[in-house]
């Protein structure tokens, strides 16, 4: 497989500008994961590059949140030939509906598309409650986190990168008056 950064650039996954991230932070870089998620064949190939590392965790169940995370969990579950469950939004939290049943011996891999602060994984851990002790690993396509998080180990990522993030009150792009673009699940309508 070609260089991953090249694949991300060719598929216009890496965007430059001034963005409001789901975490509430601002950044000059946004990873438009849907340019990958819209190409199931490519996701399959990319995930396969980490197959050995994922298999070594002995996973029996993949779980992913919302549309992006669900698609990643689906793709990993397909590769491992195990089940995948999908968490849905419930206010500020995540919820496992649809009568998804976690077995007592399940070994869970939490999956997501992009990780910035780890907030989404923490919501997933909270949602699992006592079943969180069955988590045996975390998988993310793009890890743009600055600080590692002790709750989120072991973490397997396809692409680890550094992209500056700013608290809104300390954002240099805001100070320069660059228009802020909100992308993601509730984008500003395109006029
Ligand atoms: Zn800003």
Image: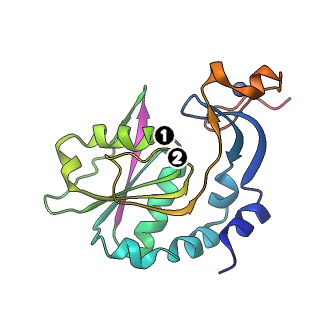
Disc 1: residue Cβ within 8 A of ligand 1's nearest atom: no
**Quadrant hosting residue 167:** top right
Q: Which mark is residue 117?
A: 1
Above-or-below relation of 138 to 124: below
Q: Main secondary structure of the magenta part?
A: strand
Residue beneath disc 2? 145
Above-or-below relation of 30 to 181: below
The residue lying at 29 percent from left, 68 percent from top is 59
The residue stretch that appears in magenta: 83-90
Location of residue 147 in the rendering, given as x and y in whole percent from the top left corner: 47, 44
The quadrant of the rendering that contains the N terminus is bottom right
Horizontal side of residue 115 vs 187, given as left or right: left
Dot 1, crowdedness within 10 Å: few (<14), some or many (≥20)?
some
State the separation of the CA atoms marked 2 and 1: 6 Å
Location of residue 180 in the rendering, given as x and y in whole percent from the top left corner: 76, 27
SS class of the residue under badge 1?
Answer: loop
Residue 143 lies in the magenta stretch: no
Cβ atoms under marks 2 and 1 closer than 8 Å: yes
């Amino acid at each position: 497989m070609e260089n991953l950064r090249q694949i991300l650039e060719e598929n216009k996954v890496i965007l430059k500008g001034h963005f409001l991230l789901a975490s509430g932070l601002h950044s000059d870089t946004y990873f438009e994961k849907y340019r990958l998620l819209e190409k199931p064949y490519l996701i399959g190939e990319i995930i396969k590059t980490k197959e050995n590392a994922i298999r070594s965790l002995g996973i029996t169940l993949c779980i992913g949140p919302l549309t992006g995370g669900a698609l990643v969990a689906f793709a990993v579950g397909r590769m491992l030939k195990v089940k995948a469950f999908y968490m849905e939004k419930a206010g500020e939290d995540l919820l496992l509906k649809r009568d998804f049943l976690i077995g007592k011996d399940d070994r869970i891999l939490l999956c997501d598309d992009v990780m910035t602060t780890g907030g989404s994984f923490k919501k997933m851990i909270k949602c699992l409650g006592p079943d969180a002790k069955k988590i045996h690993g975390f998988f993310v396509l793009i890890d743009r986190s600055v600080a590692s998080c002790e709750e989120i180990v072991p973490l397997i990522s396809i692409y680890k990168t550094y992209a500056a993030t700013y608290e809104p009150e300390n954002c240099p792009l805001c100070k320069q008056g660059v228009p802020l673009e909100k992308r993601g699940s509730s984008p500003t309508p395109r006029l």
